[in-house]
Image (cartoon, grey):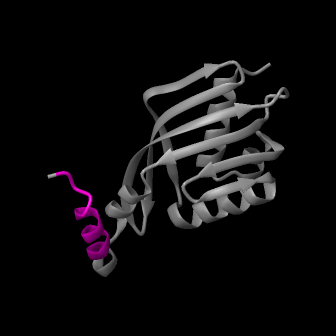
């Protein structure tokens, strides 16, 4: 039987390659993927999210960082650095994912958090860059 950390790495590799069929093979039928863009339940919704991600970011990577992967039973935690190209600009942001697997070692749920605003700050240009910059200045600690 595959180890949870190997399943996590395999699923992430399939996601990075935008291999939808292979990615979905890691999920339970009613699996859930929660991230800053919303809650995607079931393979059809996860597939739609992957198509959106491919359109928005193209090729991206999730490089182990900080604590890396930690596993406890059927649960895993993954600290990583997401690197992507958004609107033609290279961006990177730290992220963390909590993974839960069912009794068949299928992904029951992934909960991902990262700083979406930081990604916008790195990618925005022109008028949108000016607006994002103005909003960001309101939250700077002085």
**Does residue 108 appear left or right of residue 49 in this picture?**
right
In the image: residue 32, left or right of residue 136: right
Is the magenta region chiefly helix, strand or loop? helix
Quarter occupied by residue 103: top right
The stretch in magenta equals: 129-141
Q: Any magenta on residue 132?
A: yes
Is residue 17 visible in this depiction of the protein? Answer: no
Residue 53, how many percent across, how many down? 58, 60
Q: Which of 53 and 14 is in front in this view?
A: 53
Left or right side of 85 for 142: left
The image shows residue 88, relative to residue 81, as above or below, that is: below
Against 111, is 58 above or below?
A: below
Residue drawn where x is 44% and y is 56% of the image: 116
Q: Quadrant of residue 78?
A: top right
How far across and how far down the image is residue 70, in percent? 56, 22
Quarter of the image that includes the N terminus: top right
- Find residue 99 and report its horizontal and vertical position in percent: 65, 34
Residue 6 quadrant: top right
| Membership of 55 in magenta stretch | no
**Residue depicted at x 39% and y 59%:** 117
């Amino acid at each position: 039987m595959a180890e949870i950390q190997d399943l996590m790495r395999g699923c992430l590799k399939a996601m990075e390659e935008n291999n939808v069929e292979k990615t979905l093979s890691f999920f339970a039928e009613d699996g859930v993927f929660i991230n800053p863009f919303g809650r995607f339940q079931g393979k059809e919704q996860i597939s739609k999210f992957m198509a959106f991600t491919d359109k928005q970011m193209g090729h991206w990577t999730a490089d182990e960082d900080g604590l890396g992967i930690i596993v406890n039973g059927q649960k895993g935690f993954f600290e990583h650095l997401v690197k992507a190209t958004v609107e033609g600009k290279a961006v990177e942001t730290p992220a963390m994912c909590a993974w839960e697997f069912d009794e068949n070692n299928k992904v029951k749920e992934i909960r991902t958090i990262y700083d979406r605003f930081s990604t916008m700050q790195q990618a925005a240009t022109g008028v949108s860059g000016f607006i994002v910059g103005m909003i960001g200045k309101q939250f700077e600690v002085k």
